[in-house]
């Protein structure tokens, strides 16, 4: 294929590249801006049909920010107490009962 793609990598306009060369560059992601020589605008690779196939197996880029949902927002009067996970009560009771049986067995052996 011909080298017809330009890319903005680390704030620098680089190129021309063949599509395979773009895929091999370490800083190129699906959100990297590219264009051809005769194009006016830069477009993310994910929106260019000719280059989308190169990045199908790569992990999608992370969002730069998220809008908080209503359940994640803390109101002004809300207490910010830290809640720790509670241990399973069965585990504690199991060892208490086992210990009692052991003590009873010891008394049984001593006084028999």
Image (cartoon, rainbow, N blue to C red):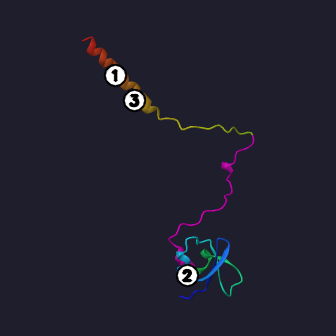
Report whether 26 appears left or right of 107: right
Name the spot of residue 65 as percent of width and height, x first. 67, 59
User: Does dot 2 land on a helix, a strand or a loop?
Assistant: helix
Q: Give the overall secondary structure of the magenta segment.
A: loop
Report whether 19 appears left or right of 40: left
Which residue corresponds to mark 3? 94
Which residue corresponds to mark 1? 101
> Exactly how many numbered labels are in the figure?
3
* Residue at image coords 53%, 66%: 59
* Residue at image coords 58%, 80%: 49
Which residue corresponds to mark 2? 19
What separation in Å lies between label 2 and label 3 (alpha carbons)? Answer: 64 Å
- Please rate how many residues cluster around mark 1, counting C-alpha atoms within 10 Å: few if below 14, some from 14 to 19, many from 20: few
User: Does dot 3 land on a helix, a strand or a loop?
Assistant: helix
Mark 2 or 1, nearer chain start: 2
Task: Indicate yes or no whether the magenta region holds residue 69.
Answer: yes
Q: Are marks 2 and 1 in contact (CB under 8 Å)?
A: no
User: Taking 78 as reference, is 67 above or below it?
Assistant: below
Mark 2 or 3, nearer chain start: 2
What separation in Å lies between label 1 and label 3 (alpha carbons)? Answer: 11 Å
State which region is magenta: 50-76
Task: Tell which of 93 and 80 is nearer to you.
Answer: 80
* Residue at image coords 56%, 37%: 84
User: Does dot 1 land on a helix, a strand or a loop?
Assistant: helix
């Amino acid at each position: 294929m011909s080298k017809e793609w330009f890319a903005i990598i680390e704030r620098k306009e680089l190129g021309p590249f063949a599509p395979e060369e773009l895929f091999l560059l370490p800083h190129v992601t699906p959100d990297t801006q590219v264009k051809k020589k005769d194009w006016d605008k830069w477009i993310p690779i994910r929106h260019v049909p000719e280059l989308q196939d190169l990045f199908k197996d790569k992990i999608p880029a992370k969002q730069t920010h998220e809008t908080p949902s209503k359940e994640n927002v803390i109101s002004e009067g809300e207490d910010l107490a830290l809640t720790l996970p509670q241990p399973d009560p069965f585990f504690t009771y199991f060892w208490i009962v086992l210990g009692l049986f052991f003590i009873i067995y010891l008394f049984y052996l001593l006084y028999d």
